[in-house]
Image: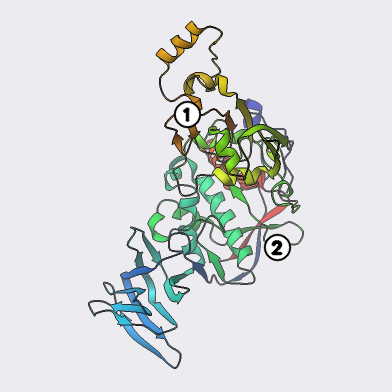
Amino acid sequence: MLPFSNRYSLGGAFLALVFIATLMIQVPPCQAQEIEVQLVWKFKDAGWVKIQIEQGNYLLKEVNTDASTSTAFPAGASLELTWGGWSPALKKNYDPFMIWNGKEIELLQQGEYGSFLVQTPDGQRVSYRGSLSLRWEDGYCKLTNHVDQEEYLKGVVPIEMSNSWAGDGIEALKAQAVAARTYMVRKTRNTTRITDSPDYDQAYLGRNVEGSASNAVESTRGEILVDSITYQPIDALYSSHNGGYMELAENVWSNPDPHFVSQPDPFSAGIGGPADRWRFIVGADVLGKAFELGPIAKIDLDKLPSGRIKKVSMQDIYGKLVSVSGRVLVQKFYPYGQPITSQAFLGNLFSAQRIPNHEAVFSLGQRVKGMPIPLNTSQDYQKLMATTSGPRLSRILSSSQGIRDVPATYDVFIFQGRGWGHGVGMSQWGAYHMAQRGFTYREILDFYYQQTDLIKSYL
């Protein structure tokens, strides 16, 4: 595979480029197998769960210390597991709750098809294929979904990208399927376990998200990216949006990886809405409190060649200084579990601007749009106060926390950023843009991953 340089532009010459397709190499196939997906994203601390068989036939197996019992569990059957006060309590179908002293419960799929629904009192409802095991540990129910690898990917690709991209971006979904499969194969080389959480591995929501993206999984069945020399699965990293510039792995995790480069990505520029451009505003006192400092008076940014922040140095009004990585700063304000908007802190490719308190009487729209209003006379001030709509900057706690009851005497910091995520490997929005412009999934993979071959790992 030829590595790609910075020779791309958005003009006609760029469209005329011919990519060299990755050679499909057939290796001795092995049978696709089940993996164990630990359900920690939506059900990490579940104190009560209800499982209902949706379709197919299952075998309910209770594993106890001395023996095991098995019961047929057809479609419509249900069980509930919760804390009974002194020990876990189990309820099957319409039976009353009974004290449960077992070690594990298994719902084993019988036959080719089967699915079940997991729900909790807080409104979580997720449907899965395959089988399920439940254990009661440390006061909570631990769930593991045993599912075929390809069926697992059908619950990954749509949540990592979107079923709605199938119309004009099916090639991007195919690229995502290959990247997700490669990650899965590498992750499970020495174990069959993986989590469903995007905080640890890949997002997975089972049948809940299955749709048009399943075609991308089927059409690339078994295909993974391997190193062109060792033929081992690569660490197929990807993020939502790289802000228009790819990043080196060692600049994020300190581990060099020849499969990634740092260079401009024209496909990720100007697409992706909030993921492309975002702005986060925070009061100096709120920013300082996040790092056990007083109100911040000064910020210095140490930037990588890509523009991403390597280190942030903050000094408070008392002279105390703290330095953290750009990723640590992002993690303090990242909107975990919240909707993604243009007012969220989404990545570490950003600039920082301090607004002195005496200027923070500008309205949010006026100040951020770069339209300063002179305040050199009391008449100017009175006019501003009479016409300003919306909260003044001096009243802002942060973009995510809202406003104060009264204006503060502290400065305000505005972080203007691009991109969503770490920026290493494939940019999902960039891949979508490439697909829209007619590139194939192999060409997309060639652009984002270097020194790799595309092989069929199993049929």
- Seen at 44% across and 9% down, the residue is 383
- Residue at the outermost front position: 318
Q: Position of residue 440 (x, y in %)?
A: 57, 44
Is disc 2 placed on a helix, strand or loop? loop
Is disc 1 placed on a helix, strand or loop? helix
Residue 232 circle label: 2
- Residue 51 appears in the picture as rendered: yes
Q: Which residue is mark 1?
A: 395
Give, as a three-letter code, the residue at label 1: Arg
Figure quadrant of the C terminus: bottom right
Q: Quadrant of residue 7?
A: top right
Image height check: is 96 above or below 321? below
Q: Residues within 10 Å of mark 1 (few under 14, many from 20)?
A: many
Q: Which of 434/345 is in front?
A: 345
- Residue at the outermost bottom position: 66
Q: Residues within 10 Å of mark 2 (few under 14, many from 20)?
A: some
Instruction: Give the Cα separation between the discs numbered 2 and 1.
Output: 54 Å
- Seen at 53% across and 37% down, the residue is 275
Image height check: is 299 above or below 451? above
- Residue 16 appears in the picture as rendered: no
Q: Which of 56/333 is in front?
A: 333
Q: Position of residue 67 (x, y in %)?
A: 42, 92
**Left or right placement of residue 367 versus residue 230 in this view:** left
- Seen at 48% across and 11% down, the residue is 381
Q: Give the number of the mark in front: 2 or 1.
A: 1
**Left or right placement of residue 295 versus residue 341 in this view:** right
